[in-house]
Image (tube, rainbow, N blue to C red):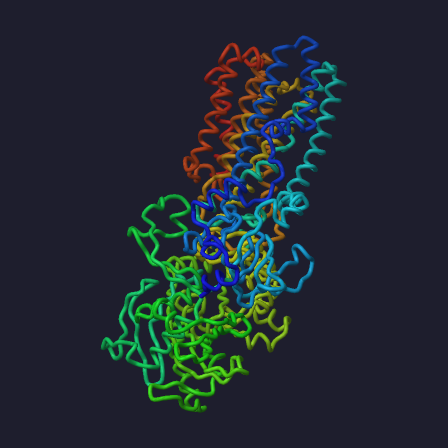
Amino acid sequence: MFSFNSIKAKFNTDRSSYEGLTEKEAKQRLEKYGFNTLKEKAKISKIKIIADQFKDILTIILLISTVISLIMGDTVEAITIIIIVFINATLGFIQEYRTEKSMEALKKLSAPHARVVRDGKITNIPASNIVPDDLIILEAGDKIPADGKVIEVASFYVDESLLTGESISVEKNISSCPNVYMGTIVMQGRAKVIVKSTGMNTEMGKIANMLQGITEEATPLQKRLEELGKFIAYLCLGICIFITLIGIIRGEPIFDMLLVGISLAVAAIPESLTATITICLALGVQRMLKRNALIRKLSAVETLGCSSVVCSDKTGTLTENKMTVTKMYTYNNLINVTGNGFNPSGKFLNNNIQINPLDIESIKLSLEISGVCNNSELSKKDISNIKKKGIASKIYNLPSISELWTIEGDPTEGALLVVAHKAGLNNNVLSKKYRRIDEIPFDSNRKCMSVICSDTKGSKLMFTKGAPDIVINKCTKMYTDRGIIELTSNIKRDIIKINENLASEALRVLCVAYKELSSSSSKEEDLVFVGLIGMIDPPRQEAFIAIKKCILAGIKPVMITGDHKITAIAIAKQLGIYKDGDKVLTGIELDKIDEKQLQKLVKDVSVYSRVSPRHKLMIIKAFKKNNHIVAMTGDGVNDAPAIKEADIGVAMGISGTDVTKEASSMILLDDNFATLIAAIEEGRIIYKNIRKFIRYLLSCNIGEVLTMFVGILLGMPLPLIPIQILSVNLLTDGLPAIALGIDPSIENEMKNKPRKSKEGIFSQGLLWLIVFRGIVIGFTTLLVFGSFLKATGNLDIARTGAYLTLVLTQLIHVFECKSEKLSLFQIPIFNNKPLILAVLCSLLVVISTIYIPFLQTIFKTAPLTINQVGIILLLSLATPIMSTIMRKS
């Protein structure tokens, strides 16, 4: 509870300095100073993206050859080849430009927010909208959004290592060290800060140019495939050079054979492989975003499919994160409280009889401590003007009513504030009776928080709340309705027993205590126990299904929580995470074992309770040493080390701190465990789709190379001329391959065990499928070419037959690639509309080049009879038919 008046007295500032700017003032400053953003490196221009499409060495060679062709008088073929090259470049430009735009949209979604005081009220705004003289609220875990000066602090420590290189946090105070800087991290405490500089005028702005040089690396999968692409490129170039030389030796025109060799190289080398994978991953990221999973690192998409362990926080991820106080215990009193969520209406019941809680002194004091020892704020929010669409509706889960109660701050503190409000002890009432002087913030080691305040009688008091097992041990006395008594060992045992009973009902229990302070003592010791407060955070309904999916998929779900062991087990049992025979470890038990012992135990433990950030790191490392791929969720600043250590660090989008989000690979926009499991499922589908189009591209390219290579070795005329080779490449390697990359799953991917992280892309017999189908495509084409040439004696008809066969076999094969287990006639063909459209477009083009006279001249084709087309269709379907028969037998 910061005092605006104290700021005014110390600084003698105007209204904007102590109550924040008005929206009107903020708008004027935004126009004057601009957005609070650092200057970014120049975006890739459209012209550069277009130019990049012509950088490929083979494309350059092809264009040079086309110029030579023009000089030699073969104008029609040269112009057609140029058109095909430019169509390829256009498709590449569209794909890359859309990917660039997608990434820009994702960056905007992940932009940080800040809490500012505007028109006298605390509100969340994008950090980019902060202006000089804004009043911002900062607490542990926040990234400081601009340079400024602190005007009120409570144990405020900042990590400035990004600017200074010093790893030790700096304590900030009003007198000697008031300045804070953009980009630094709040490690402890709370503060109010007046903004002095924004954007490029900040200290961070001075080093912005150095930061702009950082670029995203290719994913491991992309690197492996790039190496594969190079190997295939060298192999294909060798074959193409060989074909060219053989043709020249046989007496074919040198230029024609050079053009054939270059065209075949362009067709054979899967130069679009890495680009197609990037597009596939980017489109997958967009699909995940629709499911509320924001991917920050592309590598996370492929790693998701390998996840074998998911370590999840309980509160807000597996549960609803809407804590509600349901029970209160003080000496000889056990009170039930009704009501749900953050709505401050409810009843207090003693033995099912409604009572006034303020009539019972110990309950009244418990409620006062709950309201005063508290940094949350309860407000009624008007959401009638918020558009209920897109991601916003999913994040806020907006109800149909025009107003709702919301909490700014920690949900647990929010529940305590709400129960105080239910009794009529709102902020106005409490601030008249108690004046806050100082605060000892909560930290994960002490597991408690205290405030120092004075009451209307002039007494100086310490109010403390925290984990019962910690706070009770700090108490020596007990508050009762008849006075203060000694806290004997027997009474302490009774309290611990009641605490365990409350925890066994899946209640989160906090202990409240106090003491009067002398002038010399302000330590959290010799406290007076007042009561226990039990609150429930029910499991999310969708989490039940997600856990079942998780187990079915061979993924081990693990709960890691700061809650009491009994509470953790109760929730874990409900969700199906904990089963009879599983082990549970507490933070105290983890302190007694070393890393090697934990490595042996970790496979049998499903719940960890009362853990610290150091323990979380230990758990992640133990799983990784057992060769598991670990996903770890978290929200607090203390979760950042474990999230960074995990293979897939997952931050909470709503409750997560900025530092945790920065350390993460992905962000759950709805803080929901079910969203993480949906993302894992999507990750598996994306990896499967990558295998699909790799299978398709490589088998088709092998087929094209074999057609030319074997044809020349057998002494046949050239089965295809350059323009036909390029046309096949355009019609089959373009849109159909990309459409296959977004193919919906036809199998339940969550019924399979996770793939191993070191598993090769060609595992499970994929390489054999590729080579076999490539051979079949090549020899089917040669069979048509040879038989048509022998039957008609017309080389144009034979080449047209080979041309149609090569296109048709590949377009049929694209549907085979939809599944590695099912045959063509078992696959749902029509569940991918983009693929159907891509195939129909390719068929329409190839038929046009065969039957339209103008195009016949360009592509050197001849019209085929119905019987000839029937033979081609039958031969193209022969392999899928045989495959179906073999699978059934």
In screen coordinates, is 628 left or right of 260?
left
Residue 259 horizontal/vertical position (percent): 69, 19
Q: Is residue 284 visible?
A: no
Q: Quadrant of the N terminus?
A: bottom left
Q: Is residue 3 above or below residue 668?
A: below
In screen coordinates, is 851 left or right of 540?
right
Q: Residue sitting at 46 percent across and 17 percent down? A: 866
Q: Tell me the quarter of the picture where residue 426 sits.
A: bottom left
Residue 690 horizontal/vertical position (percent): 55, 42
Closest to the observer, 520 or 224:
520
Farthest residue, direction left = 353
Closest to the observer, 58 or 157:
157
Q: Is residue 799 above or below residue 566?
A: above
Residue 755 horizontal/vertical position (percent): 56, 53
Farthest residue, direction front = 12
Closest to the observer, 574 or 587:
587
Q: Is residue 478 above or below residue 854?
A: below
Residue 879 horizontal/vertical position (percent): 52, 33
In screen coordinates, is 252 left or right of 657?
right
Q: Residue sitting at 69 percent across and 16 percent down? A: 256
In screen coordinates, is 349 left or right of 682?
left
Q: In this figure, what is the number of numbered marks?
A: 0
Q: Is residue 259 visible?
A: yes
